[in-house]
Amino acid sequence: MTDGLDGEMPKPPKGLSREARQLWTDLHRQFEIDCATKTMVVRTACDALDRLRGAQKAIKKDGLTVIGRYGSPILNPVTVVERSARHALMAALGQIGYGGGIE
């Protein structure tokens, strides 16, 4: 439950959303985050969560399709960001031993 450097749970990095800061804290409490490498994986999970939520907001605002450069509806390119962020989040969580799903 520490970063292995000074025996204290590290504070969430600046710039993370409230939800990502909570994820940071929860993961440090639930898993043995005992070295800088695992802390980096937790940071990756938090960044991916913020990216996922940002993409979801953009999709909610603009829709699953947008008008492309030729005037036809196309899949919103942000859906690729959403999918990539979800995969990055799940991969990072898997690296630290989390086996559940996300919403």
Image: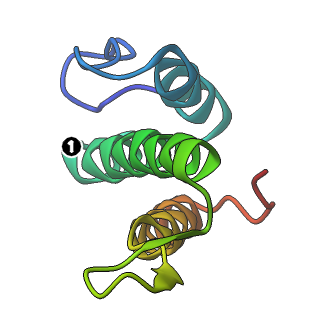
Looking at the image, residue 64 lies above or below residue 18: below
- Would residue 30 be seen by someone viewing this image from the given angle? yes
**Left or right: 14 as drawn, with respect to 16:** left
Label 1's element? Answer: helix
- Between 17 and 45, the one nearer to me in the picture: 17
Residue under the image location 19 percent in, 26 percent down: 5
Please rate how many residues cluster around mark 1, counting C-alpha atoms within 10 Å: few if below 14, some from 14 to 19, many from 20: few
- Amino acid, disc 1: Ala
Residue under the image location 45 percent in, 41 percent down: 54
**Residue 14 x/y as whole percent:** 22, 14
Looking at the image, residue 97 lies above or below residue 67: above
- Between 9 and 84, the one nearer to me in the picture: 84
**Residue 71 x/y as whole percent:** 37, 81
Q: How is the image coloured?
A: rainbow
Looking at the image, residue 64 lies above or below residue 5: below
Q: Which residue is mark 1?
A: 36
**Residue 87 x/y as whole percent:** 51, 74
**Residue 36 x/y as whole percent:** 21, 43
